[in-house]
Image (spheres, rainbow, N blue to C red):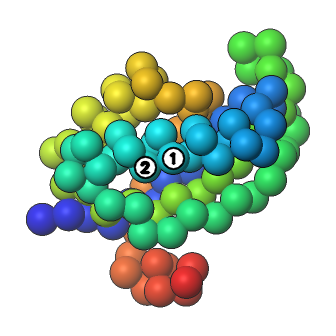
Amino acid sequence: MNTLYEGLFIFPETLDEETLDLAITRVKEELETLGGSLESTTRMGKKNFARPLKKQKAGFYVVMMIKLEGTKLDAFKKRLRLATDVFRSLFVLAEESEAAQED
């Protein structure tokens, strides 16, 4: 059974708008490869970090509501590190009502 997760993704500030769209599409493709689905995407824009991380001062924040089987979440995280431009990611369990509010 697929579980609803809220994922916060940070993409490098060096990406332009077109490359950012492509990076989000790659995340969606990796998710679908594991049998998951993308419910919604919310771009939060470019935000500065409190302190530099790996010589980066800012990043593009994107919140994605995803459905994925819980046992495949670790595999998804590994695939993100290898195949995409994701700088950082964080996942938390979300309630169904949160997904309805996003739409």
Residue sitting at x 35%, y 28%: 79
Q: Label 2: state its secondary structure.
A: helix
Dividing the image into 4 quarters, which one contains the N terminus?
A: bottom left
Residue type of the residue flagged with mark 2: Lys
Q: Position of residue 76 (x, y in %)?
A: 32, 37
Q: Is residue 58 left or right of residue 26?
A: right
Q: Position of residue 37 (x, y in %)?
A: 32, 61
Q: Label 1: state its secondary structure.
A: helix
Asked if residue 56 is positioned above or below residue 77 in the image, the reply reads above
Quick check: can you spot residue 10?
A: no
* Residue that mark 2 sits on: 28
- Classify 10 Å Cα crowding around label 1: few (below 14), some (14-19), many (20 and above): few
Work out how far the residue at label 2 is from the one at label 1, CA to CA, in angstroms: 5 Å
- The circle drawn on residue 25 is 1
Residue sitting at x 86%, y 26%: 57
Q: Are marks 2 and 1 in contact (CB under 8 Å)?
A: yes
Q: Among all residues in the image, which is located at the extreme left?
A: 1
- Classify 10 Å Cα crowding around label 2: few (below 14), some (14-19), many (20 and above): some
